[in-house]
Amino acid sequence: MKTLLFVYGTLKRDCCNHAQLAGQRFIGPARTVPGYRLCDFGSYPGMIANPADCDGVAGEIWSVDATCLRALDLFEGVPEGLYRREAISLRAPFASEKIATFIYNQSVVGRRDIGSEWIDG
């Protein structure tokens, strides 16, 4: 079974952890509905819900198989509670369906808000 996954940080094409998506299918660029922001964690971002946001977060949609999704859960620290995988809403052309993504699941106190787009540097 394939899952559509929204990635917004180091898993994107040309970013440092993109190899985690080897063998999976790129669908296209996407943006969340308003209500999400990225926080800076040094070498990676964390997406959080932020009701005051008006822009949403830019990223990519990938079709991933079950094996890859399990590996990504481990990579993203889901079992430890660093991130949680959940379904979110995106803007058109993906507005009619919920898409899986990883939401940062820890405190962001003291972390810098980096807005709506992660640039891997």
Image: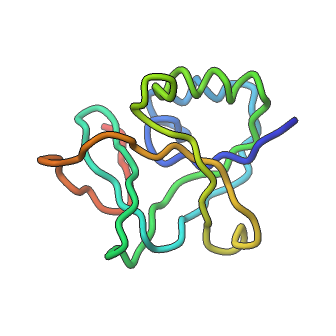
Left or right: 99, with 33 as reference point: right
Query: Residue 11, how many percent across, how many down?
Result: 52, 35
Residue 75 rendering spot, x and y as whole percentages: 51, 22
Question: Of 20 and 103, which appears nearest the observer?
Answer: 103
Instruction: Name which residue lies at 70% across and 72% down.
Output: 95
Q: In which quadrant of the rendered view does residue 113 lie?
A: bottom left
Q: Identify the residue at image location x=74%, y=51%.
A: 27
Considering depth in this image, is 16 or 40 the residue closer to the camera?
40
32 to the left or right of 99: left
When the figure is inspected, residue 72 is found, relative to residue 46, above or below; the finding is above
Above or below: residue 38 compared with residue 40: below
Q: Quadrant of residue 80?
A: top left
Residue 10 falls in which quadrant of the image?
Answer: top left
Q: Is residue 106 left or right of residue 78?
A: left
Q: Residue at x 59, y 51 (%)?
A: 60
Foreground residue among 93 and 88: 88
Image coords of residue 71 (percent x, y): 63, 21
Q: Which quadrant would the C terminus be assigned to in this image?
A: top left
Residue at the image position 48 percent from the left and 48 percent from the top = 8
Q: Is residue 30 above or below residue 121?
A: below
The quadrant of the image that shows the N terminus is top right
Left-right relation of 100 to 75: right
Q: Position of residue 101 (x, y in %)?
A: 57, 47
